[in-house]
Image (cartoon, helix red, strand yellow):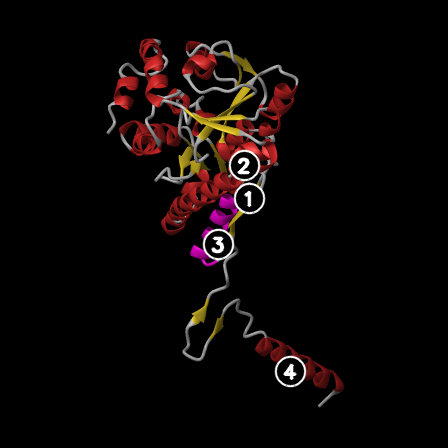
Amino acid sequence: MGKRTYVFSAVWVMVLLIIAACGGGTSASQDDGGETEKETAQPIELKLGTKMPESTPEGEAFQYFADLVKEKSGGELLVQVYPAEQLGKGTTQIDNMILGTQDMYAEGITYFQDYDSRTELSSVPFLFRDFEHYQKFNTGEIGLDIQETLIENGMRILNTERNFVRGPYRVLLSTRPVKSVDDLQGLKVRAPESAIYVDAYKHLGANPTVVAWTETYLALKQKVVEAVTSPISLVWGMKFSEVAPHVTIIDEHPQDVVIVMSEKSFQNLSEEHQQILIDAANEAGEKATELVEEAAERDLERMKEEHGIQVNDINREEWEKKMEPFFEELDESGQFPEGTIEQVRNIR
């Protein structure tokens, strides 16, 4: 055998050994039973944005949702939570969902009023008797129609049971006692940028003043306003009771949080993954309710001990009766489809 032939043979043997070591150059391997093992698929990552800090009860609930999704999907779906408006303000995050650059946003339903004015019904004082009434509204004819409208605009509510309670109830904190509706007369109440909210409190005799939520503590301290309404679970973190020690449990309207997903992102998933997200969102709602109820009891005790707050209740019937003419005006205003207010009030 010549030298050239010997070298060629040696090289050929090395090539055959490399091919054998690599399993014949294929990308899949076979087990002892002869079945082909598929390559492990990369997990699908989903962005969830919120304005709430991760240390709040709501923030904990969003992480619970993310953990549930990972568990239920066996790691095939991974939800990354971006708290404290890391992805922008509410309207920016909603735009991101529609554009497809963000998968989910979690907040109160009124943030979606640009797509359906009926979402503002949730903030009308004393329209809903309690959270059960509100939940039936959300899962009934009008609520389902609102959901369909959002889907048509490229967004879908995942927590279909609407059981993610915010609050779990609302209070009015003031620099002077408020025990009856008459005590509201002339009271400078902090108001968000909501025409319905402002008109409602004017109707009750108060003097609503629009102030940014993050500037409310200073506004109370400087007497720009004399009162603020808030879910009880947010009061301690905002330190409102330091400067407004009179707490009135008014619970004028129930609140919940919706986990909304880009319809484009939702439809890109398998039916199995879609159902996992829906189930996890509803389970997270139950967990959130537990967390906010625990926080409310704890925070109320803290405020009594450290700020010496005085807690008052109201005669709800008195306040509801005062609102009757406002409901009629709202029904005739054309802001909502004719008969909507009456339809809501008749839900049993």
Which of the two residues, 78 or 178, is positioned nearer the viewer here? Answer: 178
In the figure, residue 50 lies in which quadrant? top right
Disc 2 and disc 3: Cα gap in Å?
Answer: 19 Å
Residue 277, position as x, y percentages in the image: 42, 47
Q: Which residue: 45% across, 26% down?
A: 312
Q: Earlier in the sequence, mark 4 or mark 3?
A: 4
User: Which residue is identified by label 4?
Assistant: 13
Q: Are marks 2 and 3 in contact (CB under 8 Å)?
A: no
Disc 4 marks which amino acid?
Answer: Val
**Farthest residue in the bottom direction?**
1
Where is 155 relative to 42, above or below? above
Asked if the residue under mark 3 is in contact with the one under mark 1, i.e. CB atoms within 8 Å, the reply is no
The C terminus sits in image quarter: top left
Magenta span: 59-74
**Mark found first going from the N terminus, 1 or 4:** 4
- Cα distance between the residues tagged 1 and 3: 13 Å
Which sits in the foreground, 252 or 215?
252
What residue sits right under mark 1 in the picture? 81
Residue at 69 percent across and 79 percent down: it is 11
- Asked if residue 249 lies left or right of residue 317, the reply is right
Q: Is residue 323 above or below residue 71?
A: above
Please name the residue that numbered disc 3 is placed on.
Answer: 70
